[in-house]
Each structure stands twice: as structure tokens, then as C-alpha cells.
Amino acid sequence: MRLAYINASRIFKVLALTIVLGISAARAQSQTPVYLDDNQPIKNRVEDALKRMTLKEKIAMIHAQSKFSSPGVPRLGIPDNWTTDGPHGIRPEVLWDEWSQAGWTNDSCMAFPALTCLAATWHKDMAMLYGKSLGEEARYRNKNILLGPGVNIYRSPLNGRNFEYMGEDPYLSSQIVVPYIKGVQQNGVAACVKHFALNNSEGNRNTVNVNVDDRTLYEIYLPAFKAAVQEGGAWAIMGSYNLYKGQHCCHNEYLLNNILRKEWGFEGVVVSDWGGVHDTHQAIFNGLDMEFGTWTNGLSKGKSKAYDNYYLADPYLALINSGQVGTKELDEKVRRILRLSFLTTMNKKRPFGSFATEEHALAARKIAEDGIVLLKNKGNVLPINLNKAKTIAVIGENAVKMMTVGGGSSSLKARYEISPLDGIKARVGTQANVVYARGYVGDTTGNYNGVETGQNLVDKRPASQIMAEALDVARKADVVVFVGGLNKSDNQDAEGADRQSLSLPYNQDKLITELAKVNKNLVVVNISGNAVAMPWVNQVPAIVQGWFLGSEAGTALASILVGDVNPSGKLPFTFPVKLTDNGAHALNAFPGNDKEVTYKEGIFVGYRWAEKHNIKPLFAFGHGLSYTTFQYGKVTADKKSITASDKITFSVNVKNTGSRDGEEVVQLYISDPKSSVQRPVKELKGFEKISLKPGEQKTVTFTVDKSALSFFDAAKHDWVAEPGSFEALVGSSSADIKTKTTFVLN
């Protein structure tokens, strides 16, 4: 009996212990692993995920598995990373291993205006709206890395890719890129700012080594990237194709390790441009994290697993297994990629996004309207008075040609694109008769990367007959709107090749000259992302810079032409009269040869060069007219002198003295008349876009500190503000200064 009791007691204890242990085990199993716990700091989640990964899983994560994706860790529930072009809209889907279209029927996006147009808004709110809208489209398509925006500086008007960038001024680019990034990333999509750095020409971009002094590098070509990192909090940066200091920029010791990570504290991912990686050892040690596009068709070299042969794939694994390199650098790369995943695909609060919606159409239209620039308006030809103009002649190929297709990686399959002709017709309705004539024949193709416009622009008539028809139509009209400029064909505004000339192609200069002779009410609309020569400028009363405006191009342009919207865009780069008015070309320093290019003009890019040499531009940086007028008061400062730790605030009253609502971009420039080093005549250091009703007045204020007064001292490798007298200049463009004041830095 006693033995039975003892055995029963032991059994009870064993059962009890088993139950307790079972409960404990169940609790342990129900606890969320650290890497899956949203409540844990991202750093802890990264370390927990990293220690669970195998060597092969780590290697797999740092290179592509398809044209646009890299693997996650399926075993751990970490999703793949999916990238997408581009900066102006979400690229259509392509096949896994090929550039050919995947044939989806639901990937037609909203096309937003090119980034030159966004920069021309000089409006930070527009940049935020742009980023937010584009981020929503990327998120809806389940992309977590958006390959944009681009912020390379406009050094020459011949760079084929300038339309994807934000102009010639580092301050303007810096101010526009920051809200763009924040807008994108609030959707759980990483902005991948490109192309870092010194990618300022296309034709020799894969082989050219850029020679530039440190002062020029830091003052002109790096500020927008620095702002993207330190103010915008960009989660990714893309390296450029070219070389600097003899190393390709996708694995460049000086740019990626020394500047980007050590100086700026960048914690994000460095992504290679497609085909931009050339060396395993440099890719390991010089700051690259993710390799894409090597042997870009994905199937080269006769190997069935082409992606395993990337520089950061099997070759890297072999070096580790042989003991030639360790895993420290690999772990750092994987940490950064995991951080990106936890900010994007692993973020449970990530919104769902939306795609090609009416809301996005309205955003695209608003940005386009805000960025269109009225360059000239002699005799108030614009806005078109529909009470008087009963016949409007629209002339030019660009009035009907689709511009969302082509141009390189930013080519889009848009849900729709409203042409300038259709936009004008829709707005005018029955108020006037709109007639069209071709005028010239340019590029009649309509296919890029398998995306087809569906347009048949072939016209086999003699050029003389096509021009004669246009002149006849123009002669009978009350107003003529010529819509021409560039397109996105090779050697125009397109990736992969530079322009061959500043002139308009397809004999447009001759046509415009003849149109001006037969009708004095001529409006020239230049569609381009670059400056063009205008030998007919004095013969044409009204000129509009129309950019590549995206899906709502025609609607936005029509609203400006008829005056529904008052133009308020300002040029983000200088229009030179001739090519040699640009510093790079005056010094025969563009594009260099296929191996070397030296930036001989140094810091004197754009308006800085023109002002140094007293060259009058065709249209100045910051220029843009309105249908109303503005009056500037006298600028004042809140103090006469400051110390290096102080800030100074400038104030100026601006009044709308015209008869209609309008927006004005008030611009602040700083000048250092007496310096120990050569400095620009003045530099942009502030701007504000304000809206004013007729008779309304507002006070605009700018607050700056010593950073606005500083230059980069290469010997000290630091920014220096020298004591002395400075000038603050306020105006409506770099060439139209309205008021100025002096102050002293003690």
C-alpha cells in the first residue's frame, strides 16, 4: 500500500512537471522571434535575423535573382526585394530574365512630369506631392525600392539625361529632393537617389574617369546627395557608371566609404546601377551592398544560373570558403539590406498604396501646371483670348507625339497621355476652331522596350509640302501655337547618348522663322528637358517652356495657354545663347574622350559661369514670367552683423500689382565680394513660392547661418566662412535682382 502511494506520488509529480514544462514550451513557441516583432528596435531585429541566416542565404541576398529583384530569406519569412524604374512613373513589368515586356494588362501607370519640370516649380509642396503619389503607385505594385530621384547637376545642355535631373544649382536640387524622398518613403518604399556621383554625360558613361577638384566636388556635385541622406533620410543610394579617382563609382572607396558612410553617416543600402559592377574585390570592400544587372540579359556566358556568377555571388563565396576574405563586410551588407526590409516589406503598418487613380492624375496635372515656364510674352499674346481668337492653328509634331514612351529607363507604359493638341481642343471646345498641321516630320517610331504608342506618325510627303501646308494654316489663323522642341529619341533627351547640337532638330528653326513672318500672334511651346538655341527669339512674341509633362501634358499646357492657370514656373537651369556660353563647352571640356574628362570650369557651372564672364544668357536661371505683375519692397536684415554661431533673417515685402491671382518665386542670393579665394558673383541660398491675390502683399523671410556664407577649403577639408562684408540679394531670377542689403560676419 505504501509502495503504491509512493509510485502514485511520483507519477503525479512527473505529470505535474510534464504539464509545467509543456506550458513553458508552448509559451516559448508562441513568443514572436525578435526579427518578426514590430515592437523591437530595428537594430535588434536586424541582428536577430542575421544570426539565423546561413552563409549562402547572405550571399544570395546581396545580388539579383532576376532583372529587377533580389532574394529575401523564404525560410525566415523575409520577402524578396523588388526594384522599379523610374523617377517619373512606375515601369511596366518585364520578363524574369529579359527586358521584354511581361504582357501584363494592369501595369499601365500614371506618368508624372519629368524632374526638370518638378524642379521648375521651385515648390517644396509639389515635391512632396510628387513623391507621395509616386510612392503610392510603387507600393501598390509591391515594389520596395524606387530607382530615383536623380540629382546629378546640369553641367552641359547636351547631356542626354538632364531631363531626369533637377537642374544646375546644388541648393535648388537639395531643397526639392528632400520632400520628394519623404513623400516616397512614407509609403514604405525606399527612394534610391541616383547617380552617385559625377554622372554628367551619357555617351561615354561606362568608361570615362572624371577629374574634378575637391572644392568643386563638395560645392557643386555633392550637396543634393548630402541633403538626400542627412535631411531626406534616403534609405538607398545608386552608384553611377563612370569612374572617379580610377575606380568605378558603384564600388568607389572615396565616394562610398569615406564620404557617404563616414562623413555623412549613411545607414542605407548602396545599389549598383545595372551593369555598373566590374570587380569582386572592390565590390566587397568599397561600399557596395546590392549588385544588379551584371551581364544584363541574365543568361549570358552560356550558364544556366547566370545570377550565381555575379561578382558578389559565387566568386565572393569562393573567396570566403578559401579563407582569402572574411565575412565582416558581408554581414555589414546584409545588415543594411535587412534594415531596408524592416522599413519596407516587413513593416506591418505599411500602407497599401494606389495606382493610376484620378487623385494621381490631378497631382500630375497640378505639378505640370506649376512647372511650366513662361519665357517671353511680348504684347501679351498670352493668355489666348477666346473672345477674339476664333481660329487657333496648332502646328508641330510634338503637339501629337507621345512623350511618355522612350528616353531610356524612365520610359513608361502610361494609362493614358493627353497630347497638347487634344488638350487644347478639349479646353477650347466650341469657343474656337482648332486646326492642325504637322509642319515637320521628326521621329515616327513609337516603340521602346516593347512598349508601343500605337501611333502612326509616318508622313512621306516632301518636307517643303509639309511646311507649306503649315504656313497656309498659320496665315489664316488668329493665333498660332507651335509645339516643337526635342523628343526622347537617341541624341536628344534620352539615356545612353548625348545631344549633338544645341539647335532644334528636324529644321524647326526654319519653320518657326517662316511662321513668324505669316502670323504676328505666334506662341512657341518648347517641349524638352534641356535648353535649346533660339535664333528666332526676337521674331517670336511668346515662348513657353513645356518640359515632358506626363499623362496630363495637354490638359496642363492648355490651362496655361488660355489663362485658366497663371504660369509660375522658373527655370532650374540657364538657357545659353550659344553652346560656348556654357563653361564646359567654352573650355572644350565636354564630354572629354572615352577615358578621361576634366571639369575645367570648376565651381563655375550654369549661371555662375555666365556671371563671372558677363555673358548675357538667352534666359537666366530662375527666370519665369507671369500674367500678373509683382512689386518688391526693400529687403531688410534683423541685424547688421553676426558671429559664426548666429543666424540672420532677411525680410522683403512682395505685392501683386496686377489684376489676377498669381504665384511668385522670391529668390535669395548671397554674395561675398571680397574673398581670399575665387567665388561666384552670387549663389542661391533661399527661395519661397508665394501666392498673392490682386493687391495682396506678403512678407517673405529667409533665415541663414554661416553655411550659406561658406566655401569648401580643400586643404582643410572643411567648410570655411571668412569674416567680412556680405551682400544679400533678393529678386525674381538670377538676372533680375530687385533689392539688396549688406551685413558683416565678425
Image (spheres, grey):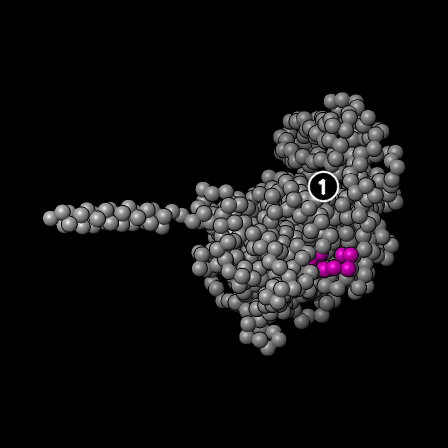
Under circle 1, the secondary element is helix
Which corner quadrant of the image does residue 435 belong to? bottom right
**The magenta segment:** 244-252
Residue type at the position of mark 1: Tyr
Which corner quadrant of the image does residue 408 belong to? bottom right
Residue plotted at (46% across, 49% down): 35
Q: Is residue 82 left or right of residue 257?
A: left
Quick check: can you spot residue 644?
yes
Which of the two residues, 401 or 265, is positioned nearer the viewer here? 265
Q: Residues within 10 Å of mark 1 (few under 14, many from 20)?
A: some
Residue plotted at (77% across, 25% down): 642
Which of the two residues, 616 or 644, is positioned nearer the viewer here? 644
Residue plotted at (74% across, 44% down): 169
Q: Residue 101: give x, y in percent of width and height.
A: 53, 67
Q: Residue 186: give x, y in percent of width and height.
A: 53, 44
Quick check: can you spot residue 121?
no
Which of the two residues, 677 or 572, is positioned nearer the viewer here? 677
Provide the residue designation for mark 1: 171
Q: Is residue 250 magenta?
A: yes
**Compared to 728, does 372 lie above or below?**
below
